[in-house]
Image (cartoon, rainbow, N blue to C red):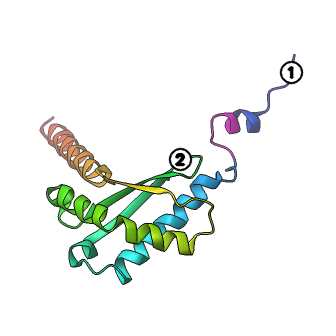
Amino acid sequence: MAEWHPKQELESFGIGPSKTPKRADRVADVIRNELSILILQKVRDPELREVNISRVELSDDLKHAKIYFTTLDGSGQASHIKKRLLKAKGFMRSHLAKSLNLRFTPDLHFWYDETVEKVEEMEKLLEELAKERNEREQNS
C-alpha cells in the first residue's frame, strides 16, 4: 500500500505551493495593466476616465480577451460605458499590438463586472444577520 503524503494531498486540492501561472494568466495581467494605464493617460473620451479595469480573462490560445470593467456610477451606466469602450476598441487593440510582443493581438470583449456589487450585497446581509443575532442574545 502506498504511503500517505499530506503535502501531495494538499497540492491535489490546489492548497499547497502555488504553481507557476499559465501563460494566458500572465498575459492577461499585462493586458489589464496596459489598458488601465491607457484609459487614464491616452483615451480622450472623458466618460471613460471613470472606468476601472477589474480583471481580464484570456483564452488559452490568446486570441480572445474578456475585459471586465467597473464604473464609479455603478451598473446604471454600464451599457453606455460598454458602447464607449467598444468605440475605443480599435485604439486599444493597436496600443496592445505595439506594447505586447505577441503573434496575434487578442480580440477584446467588454463585460460589466458585477462582483463588487454582489460583495456589497453579501456584506449587508451578513451585517443584518449579525444584528439579529445580537438582538436575540440581548433579549434572551
**Image coords of residue 2 (percent x, y):** 86, 21
Q: Is residue 46 above or below residue 9?
A: below
Asked if the residue under mark 2 is in contact with the one under mark 1, i.e. CB atoms within 8 Å, the reply is no
Mark 1 secondary-structure assignment: loop
Report the residue that reaches farthest toward the right: 1
Nearest to the observer: residue 38 or residue 11: 38
Q: Residues within 10 Å of mark 1 (few under 14, many from 20)?
A: few
Residue at the spot x=18%, y=44% of the render?
A: 128
Which quadrant would residue 126 be assigned to in this image?
A: top left
Residue 65 vs residue 48: left or right?
Answer: right
Q: Is residue 13 magenta?
A: yes
Q: Which residue is mark 2?
A: 59
Q: Quadrant of the N terminus?
A: top right
Residue 127 vs residue 102: left or right?
Answer: left
Q: Is residue 121 magenta?
A: no
Nearest to the observer: residue 116 or residue 38: 38
As measured in the structure, the alpha-carbon distance from the residue carrying label 1 to the one carrying label 2 is 38 Å
Q: Residues within 10 Å of mark 2 (few under 14, many from 20)?
A: some
Q: Which residues are magenta?
A: 10-16
Residue at the spot x=16%, y=60% of the render?
A: 77
Q: Quadrant of the C terminus?
A: top left
Which quadrant would residue 35 be assigned to in this image?
A: bottom left
Q: Which residue is mark 1?
A: 2
Residue 6 vs residue 59: left or right?
Answer: right
**Image coords of residue 8 (percent x, y):** 75, 36
Q: Amino acid at mark 1?
A: Ala
Residue at the spot x=21%, y=43% of the render?
A: 125
The earlier-in-sequence mark between 1 and 2 is 1
Q: Amino acid at mark 2?
A: Ser
Name the mark nearer the viewer: 1 or 2. 2
